[in-house]
Structure formats: C-alpha cells, structure tokens
Image (tube, rainbow, N blue to C red):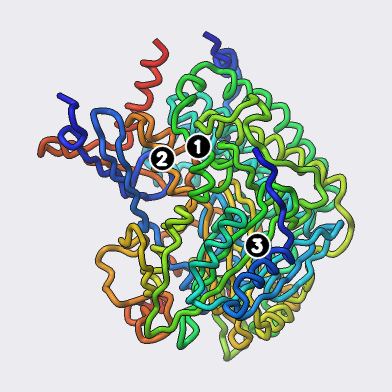
Amino acid sequence: MTEEKIFTAEEIVNSFKDEFKIKIIDIKIKKRSAGVKKNETSYIWMKIDKGAFKDIIKHLCALQFPHLAIISGNDLGNSIELIYHFTLNFGHPRSETILNISVDLPKSNPEIESICDLIPGALITEREKQEFLGVKIIGIPDDRRLFLPEDFPEGIYPWRRDETGPDKLYRNLHEVKK
Amino acid sequence: MKFSMLPKAFAQMFKKPWTNKFPAKYAPSNTTKFLENVQAGKAKIIPPVETPPGFRGKIQYDKEKCIGCQLCLKVCPSEAIEFKPEDKKIKIYLARCTFCSQCNDICPTNCLSMSNEFLLADSDLYSKDLIVE
Amino acid sequence: MNKTSVTKSTYQIPIGPIHPALKEPVFFEFELDGEKIVDVDVKLGHVHRAIEWASRKRNPVQILYLAERICGICSYCHPIAFSLAVESAADIQVPERAEYLRVIHGELERICSHILWAGVAAHEIGFDTVLYLTWQIREKALDLTEYLTGNRVTKGITMIGGVRRDITQDMIPKIQESLKYFKDNFEKLRGIFLDDKTFKMRSQNCGILTKENALKLCAVGPTTRASGVKKDVRVDTSYFAYGDLDINYITPDILTGKVNGDVYDRIIVRLLEVKQSIDLIEQCLDKMPAGPIVAEPKIAKLLAQLKKTNGEGVGRHEAPRGEVIHYVKLDGVNEAPYTWKVRAPTYNNILPWIPMLKGNQIADIPIVAASTDPCMSCTNRIAIIKDGNRFELNKEELHRLSVEKTRRLML
C-alpha cells in the first residue's frame, strides 16, 4: 500500500486555482476548532462555473479519490444551486478536509452532467436531485424515481419555492377541532 | 462443538426473571373486570419501576406565576400550547405534547415543571385529564 | 431444471416494501437462479415523511425536536448534527464542558445501538437466547440514559450551543456502576459472538464487500470499516472533544489479523466499538473540565441571534451506523432555515447491498441485510411468482428459511 499524501486545505485550494483560474468564481477556507486542545478542521467552500464542472471533478479524483457525502440543493429564485459535499484525507487522524463545491444552474435550463462514471456511489443522491428539484442529470445510468411514489404528479418538484412547488398538494392537518 | 451459550441458558432456569410484572402477573382476560376488582380491593396492581428524578412526565402549570409572555408558544415543536388572550394565561393540550420540556427551559418565571406521571392513556384526546390550564 | 443459460431459468422475486430483517420498508427485487441470487434491484421511499419540508415553518429550536424523530435509534445523532451545522453557520463557540458531555451521550447511544444490533443479528441466525441476553444488557444502558436525560429514547439533550442537562458529581457513581456492568458482560458477549461455532459457520465468507467496492460506492460506518477502509468521522475530524481523547480506527485486523469484508468482520467491528465506547466514556469522565454547559442560556436571545445570521454550515457526526451529515442555510430574514438537508447513514449503505447479495442464497438475505444495520423499518410479505402461480411468503417464512439453513450447516 503506497502511503497517501495528506493535502492541506491551502494545497488543495492552490491546486484548483492553478489549474482552473477564472472558472472558479469564489473560493474560501473556514476553520472551526473544538475541544480543549482546539484542533482545527478546514472547510473549503468553492463556487464554480458550470462549464468546467466535469473537468474539476476529474481533477479532484486524480488528486485523491474523495468520499462523496451528499449533494444538497437550494432554490435561489432564478437559479438552482447544487452543492456537492466531498471529504478528502480520510484515513489519517485529524486531517480530514471538507470540500463543498457549489454550481449554479439557470432555471431555464437546469442540466448538469452525471458523475456516476467517476464515483459510482453518487447514483442515489443524483436520482434524488432529479425528482426533488427538477434538475436533469445527463448520462445518469438509472433515472427512475427514488423517494416519491409512482403516482406523484409530474412537473411538481417538492423543494422548489416557485410555482412548481408542492403547495397545492399538502393538507393543513394543523387545524383540528378544539 | 463448543456452545458457549449453553451454561448461561442453563443457569437462567434457576434465576428470577428480569421482568417487572406490571400491572399483574398474567394479562387479565377481562380488563374492565380486573380494574373493578382493583377498585374494590380484591386484586392488587404491581407498581411499575420507579422513575428517576428528572423524568419528563406530565407537565405541571403554576397559574399564578405565569405572566402571559407567550415565549413557550414560540418554542413548542408541536404547537401544543394555546394562549388565552382574555386572562393572559395558557392552555396545554397533552394530546399533542411531545414531553420535550423546552417550554420549562424558556419560561422566565419558572411556572412550568415536569412531574413523573406517565400513565396518561385515554380514549378521548380532549378529555379533562389531558388538558392542563 | 437445466441451468444452461441464465435467462431461461431465473425468476424474479419482489421483496417488500415491508420486508425481512429489519426496521423499515424497502423494496427489493431479486433475480434468482435456483437458490442463488443473480441480481438485485432496490427501490426506496416508503417512509418518506417530508421532514425537510416541515422545517420550513419552524425555528431552529423546534427543528431540534423534529430532527429527533427522524429515527428512533439514532435519535441523538440527527439533532446533534443539525446543531453542529447551525453552530458552523452562525459561528457559535461551544463551551468545553458541553463538548465532553456531548461525547458521553453519543457514546452511550452507540452502546445501546450496537447491543440492539447484536441481538437482532443473533435472532436472524436463529439464536434467540442471545437476543434475550443482549437486550437484557441493553436495558441497563437505557436505564442509564433515562437517568441522565429524562427519557429512554427521545433524549432531548441537545441545544444549539451546548447541552441542556449537566452531569453533576452525585450522578457519577451510577454511571460508573453501569460501566462496570457493561465491562463484565462485554466479555460474555464477546465469547458468544466470536468464539461460538454457530456464528462463525453462518457468517464467515457470506455477504463480502471488497475494499475497492466500499471506496467506490462511498459506504460509511462499520460496513466500510469491516472491509478495511479507515473512515470514521470521530478520528478524521476533530469535533466535540474527540480531538483530546485517545481514539483510533477499528478494523477487523485488530482482532484477527486479516480483513475479509464479510458478515463476521462486521460483527467484530461492532463488538470492538462497544468496548471502545466504554473506554471513551471513562476517559471523558476523567478529563471533563468545569464550566458552563451552553453558549447562550437565554433561548429567546439565541433565536434572535439566529434570525439575523446569514450563512451556511455543514455538520457531520459518526452515528452508530455511519456518517450523518446535515446542511443548513440560514438566510438572515426568516427564523426558519432556508434549506435543511439531512442525509442519514443508511442511504450511502444501500448501494453496497448489490455486490454483497450477489452470489448468496435466499436464506442469507436476512443476515446480510441485517449486518449492514440498516436504520429501516420492519417487515412483512414477499410474493414469489413462479411459473405463473403466486406464493406468498411472509417474514416468518423467510426467518424460518434462515434458521433452517443454520440447522443444515450444523449437521
């Protein structure tokens, strides 16, 4: 087993910046400390351009195979923001870095490439984003519904805050007879 | 063949069972009749295991201390507390209460506390026993 | 039946949505060739309760109790991960004593959960006596939880910025008495699970997950540690007081010297983790500093501060089943968070079921599914469609098949 190199947060940030320059819109490191000894954990928040998304993920996998925790999504009015939460350097005590890559997709064309060919474990979380936010993931091996029932109407996306949200579907069980 | 569980299973035959037989040793075939017998003194209910101090049971409300600030309504996760505007006091519906005691923590006058009563089952959600005011 | 080509002689069994060997509804569709499983398909969504949507009209303190009810066994992990995410977003510094207290409660929950799992795994093999023994030990752990927090399951001990109840000096003798009880009984459990021939027969070389698959499919928790991947949020990152304590990854080669990735290895990892938890609680009781237990004791002030915060945060915790991650975005205008994303550990452990179950027999389904300890709820019927006739097998039948296999192996 070859010894894996432990990348510090600054090295990771510099590696991305050198390779992708203007495609990275914003990148910042945040550190949190805990316990009596105040050991620090680094969180990298990176905002990238949609066009370079697949190349950036390829660069990340080449650097060190990451652990994909989850993809979370935000409905920001005119665009949908997807945030990919990766972690690196697991296996070495107290050196893990959490890398959050966020991509903005315009609502007129919410499409993004799948990363299942690079990281097969992303299948379930990509299917979830397809049905909850209405994002179209190109190249996904399996695009069936995951959590919503079969008879849930098409075109209604539960996490959205606009007219395609589920407002017509819920009953206010709140009002009980008093 | 080594079966390490065998001696322990054998030893259990001679030990007292761990279960506390609440309310009676065997389940009564007719529950209402059993309860009538208890009232009349002919049968006894074996008490449940003692609750520790700090147990979160039925909520107790000290009406005089309440100032009507409505902070407890703000933190109740299930909206089980109702404000009565005419006399500025609250009414708690135990049918919705989750027994989290968050209202106890936020109350500025400490008028709410949790007792150790937990036998609260009832068939009517809004009966007298399940409303605290 | 001639088994010349797979397509001619396989049939498909749908299992679920209410299904064998554990706690929540999941729908499997197995393609079988005789008794061997050729392919597996998983469908989810039967207990989808729209919890993340329900958080849109609740403030962060109310969401703590909503998060607690996501799962009964991991009822401490979800509020604590949410709390970590909010503290990261709002930059709240937690006092040191609270961090040690959080470790104690987390490890106590881990003990309860792993002992419950040990009993269920024994039950799936057919060894009911062990189920009763382990759950008796678990009663002591639940009594201790009730003493420390007020309730056995929904603990309600987390608050944003700390914990709600302190452990005072007069509580410590009871904790130490319980820990002594666990240590004495741990040796009993270890003897039964790891030395007994029945367990070894049924679980070795069954449900193997290779290290490469565990890495590629992003598995988490004891499932992946049993395959040799060193992934544990408590050791990797320094949160709560884990950075101060003596803790290391638990992989099967600590005990046996080699890593197989089968069900037996998962049993080893979980039992060793119980021992590690007992040890961690003792370290915490020794090293706990004095001080406040919550960063902001006045909750109304805390809520006002969170209402003005604008930021996003990620909170991760090592639940008994793996890594829990919560993402919270606060927008600075409403009291309710703008977005709350929950990811329970079992969702990452579902894809590994596919390589684990291929090549095994039907009677192995309960023990392999149970060995990943899915936090999913329990069972009922499966329908077998064979040559156009429908047979219905319920949980008792599947369980009976599993127990019969144990008897066959014994003779």
N-terminal label among 2 and 1: 1
Residue A98: mark in rendering: 3
Residue C111 is situated, as x and y percent measured from the top left of the image, at 64, 41
The residue nearer to you, when weighing C81 against A71, is A71
Amino acid type, mark 1: Thr
Residue B128 is situated, as x and y percent measured from the top left of the image, at 50, 68
Left or right of C387 on screen, residue B41: right
Are the residues under badges 2 and 1 in a single subunit?
A: yes
Amino acid type, mark 3: Ile
Mark 2 and mark 3: Cα distance apart in space: 28 Å
Amino acid type, mark 2: Pro
Residue C355: mark in rendering: 2
Image vertical order of residue C10 relative to residue C157, above or below:
above
Labels 1 and 3 touching (C-beta < 8 A)? no
Q: Residue furthest right?
A: C290
Q: Check the residue under mark 3 and report the chain it is in.
A: A
x 75%, y 64%: residue: C162
Q: Secondary structure at mark 3?
A: strand
* Label 2 Cα crowd, 10 Å radius (few <14 / some 14-19 / many 20+): some
x 39%, y 43%: residue: C354
x 70%, y 43%: residue: A3
